[in-house]
Image (cartoon, grey):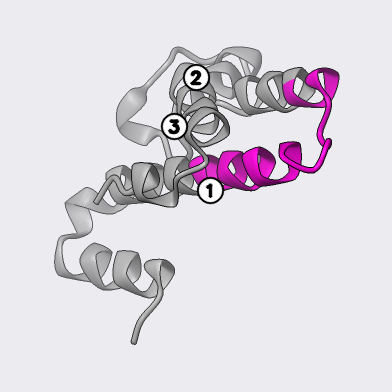
């Protein structure tokens, strides 16, 4: 049995042109899984609303588009490896709101 990372590497080797796109999909799936974890811990009283908002801000802050802008570059989606700020927030929120890892499958 292979994990998600192994599957992504195999797909990238089979189709090098899809390398960045597959990396973005894997990263967004990881954001969603983080949200699922957040959902599960919220059932036990953690994290609180402030923690959730901080997590959403952090996801937005590390979007490839924002990082490129901060570096004085234009935004080049074809070079993204982690997804845009909007995508990262969307996938984190998907996990936070659903708590369902099945909703994280983007492959």
Q: Residues within 10 Å of mark 1 (few under 14, many from 20)?
A: many
In reply to whether residue 32 is colored magenta, the answer given is yes
Picture quadrant of residue 77: top left
Classify 68 as above or below 9. Answer: above
Counting residues from the N terminus, which is met first, the one under dot 2 or under dot 1?
1
Q: Nearer the viewer, mark 3 or mark 1?
A: 1
Question: Which type of secondary structure does the marked residue at label 1 adopt?
Answer: helix
Q: Position of residue 49 (x, y in %)?
A: 79, 19
Q: Position of residue 36 (x, y in %)?
A: 57, 44
Query: Which residue appears at 29% of the width and 43% of the height?
Result: 21
Q: Residues within 10 Å of mark 3 (few under 14, many from 20)?
A: many
Q: Which residue is mark 3?
A: 83
In reply to whether residue 88 is colored magenta, the answer given is no
Counting residues from the N terminus, which is met first, the one under dot 3 or under dot 1?
1
Q: Which residues are drawn in magenta?
A: 31-52
Q: What is the quadrant of the N terminus in the image?
A: bottom left
Q: Position of residue 59 (x, y in %)?
A: 63, 28
15 or 95, which lies in front? 95
Would residue 46 be found to the left or right of residue 71 on screen? right
Q: Which residue is mark 2?
A: 65
Query: Which residue appears at 26% of the width and 73% of the height?
Result: 10
The CA span between labels 3 and 2 is 8 Å
Q: Nearer the viewer, mark 3 or mark 2?
A: 3
Would residue 103 be found to the left or right of residue 82 on screen? left
Counting residues from the N terminus, which is met first, the one under dot 3 or under dot 2?
2
In the rendered structure, find residue 33 and report the number of the disc placed on it.
Answer: 1
Classify 10 as above or below 101. Answer: below
Question: Which type of secondary structure does the marked residue at label 3 adopt?
Answer: loop
Query: Which residue appears at 81% of the width and 34% of the height?
Result: 47
Query: Which residue appears at 72% of the width and 28% of the height?
Result: 55
> Is the magenta region chiefly helix, strand or loop?
helix
């Amino acid at each position: 049995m292979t994990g998600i990372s192994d599957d992504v590497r195999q797909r990238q080797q089979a189709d090098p042109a899809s390398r960045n796109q597959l990396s973005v999909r894997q990263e967004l799936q990881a954001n969603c899984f983080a949200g699922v974890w957040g959902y599960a811990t919220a059932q036990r009283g953690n994290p609180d609303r402030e923690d959730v908002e901080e997590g959403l801000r952090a996801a937005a802050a590390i979007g490839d588009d924002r990082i490129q802008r901060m570096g004085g570059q234009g935004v080049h989606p074809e070079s993204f490896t982690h997804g845009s700020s909007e995508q990262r927030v969307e996938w984190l929120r998907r996990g936070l709101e659903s708590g369902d890892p099945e909703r994280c499958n983007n492959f």
